[in-house]
Image: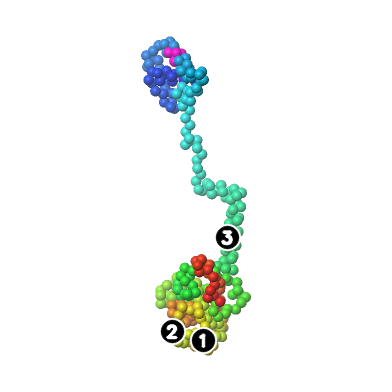
Amino acid sequence: MKFLNLAAIGSMVLGMGISPTIAFTPSFSQIKISPLGMANKLKFLKRNTSMNMAGDNGDKTDDPNPGGMSDWNDDEDNAPQSENFLDVLKNWIRSDEGKEDIQTYTLSLAIALILRLTIIEPRYIPSLSMYPTFDIGDQLAVEKVTKRIRPFNRNEVVVFNPPDSFREIMANNYGNAKKSKEALIKRIVAVEGDEVIVRNGKLFINGKQQDEPFTNEDAAYEFGPVLVPAGDVLVLGDNRNHSLDGHIWGFLPKENVIGRAVFIYWPPWRVGNEGMF
């Protein structure tokens, strides 16, 4: 090392550069000086340099890069390589934390699916057939338990799978078989055994005019008299003149009912159950 330091100092004096990573040691023939002269020259330079490195107060200042030889580290080569996403995912799955998280997520998902399939589920309103009770974009909760233990009543709002008669109308008149399978939302206006008549825009059940503050307007059609058969209900939209409902496709089997609409939860300014009986 001492020899390299001396060689470096000598080369700087003679104007011969040294690479930061590779020390270039010239031959004696290249610099045209005798070996003895070269040795004497290097001893002189070493002694002179040591004296210059001492300050006026005698304190010695360490050379931060002795002999011009730099100990360079390749940070990019030594830096740890970042793992790709799959490696990170595999390590997470194998870890105790990952296993615990997976169990938590799986249990949460299972509970959510059970709740949706058996107890309550969200629904989105895509049309104005039930306006003003529901507006486009409303999101509501539909409970699915009480349909098994409590009979349906008039004025209740229900979500249901459309009957075959509705699907035939959609396929034949509108050419939209996909839409014909989507769940619908309407209001029960009559139950089994009821006689239904729509006359002069008003709904009559068993000869009695019904009070319907939730409707958007009086019906512009005549309907009935009809008798609701056993096992069925009659449903109409609150927006009577803009609803493809039971006055067109007939009665709804009870078995098609998914559940009762209980409240709107979105948007915030419409939260509540006004108009749902």
The image position of residue 276, as x and y in percent, is 54, 75
Q: Earlier in the sequence, mark 1 or mark 2?
A: 1
The image position of residue 105, as x and y in percent, is 58, 56
Residue 46, visible in the rendered structure: no
Q: Is residue 124 located in the magenta-colored stretch of the structure?
A: no
Q: Amino acid at mark 3?
A: Leu
Q: Mark 2 highlights which residue?
A: 221
Q: In the displayed image of the protein, which residue is found farthest to the bottom?
A: 207
Between marks 3 and 1 in the image, the one whose residue lies nearer the viewer: 1
Query: Which residue occupies 61% across, 77% down?
Result: 150
Q: Earlier in the sequence, mark 3 or mark 1?
A: 3
The image position of residue 187, as x and y in percent, is 52, 77
Q: Is residue 84 left or right of residue 98?
A: left
Query: Which residue occupies 50% across, 22% down?
Result: 61
Query: Disc 2 versus disc 3: distance between alpha carbons?
Result: 47 Å
Q: Helix, strand or loop at disc 1?
A: strand
The image's mark for residue 209 is 1
The image's mark for residue 109 is 3
Q: Quick check: 74 above or below 122?
A: above
Between marks 1 and 2 in the image, the one whose residue lies nearer the viewer: 1
Q: Amino acid at mark 2?
A: Tyr
Q: Which residues are magenta?
A: 41-45
Q: Earlier in the sequence, mark 2 or mark 3?
A: 3
Count of numbered circles in the view: 3
Q: Helix, strand or loop at disc 3?
A: helix
Query: Disc 1 versus disc 2: distance between alpha carbons?
Result: 16 Å
Query: Disc 3 versus disc 1: distance between alpha carbons?
Result: 48 Å
Q: Local crowd at mark 2 within 10 Å, few (<14), some, or many (≥20)?
A: few
The image position of residue 200, as x and y in percent, is 45, 87
The image's colouring method is rainbow
Q: Is residue 44 located in the magenta-colored stretch of the structure?
A: yes
Residue 203, visible in the rendered structure: yes
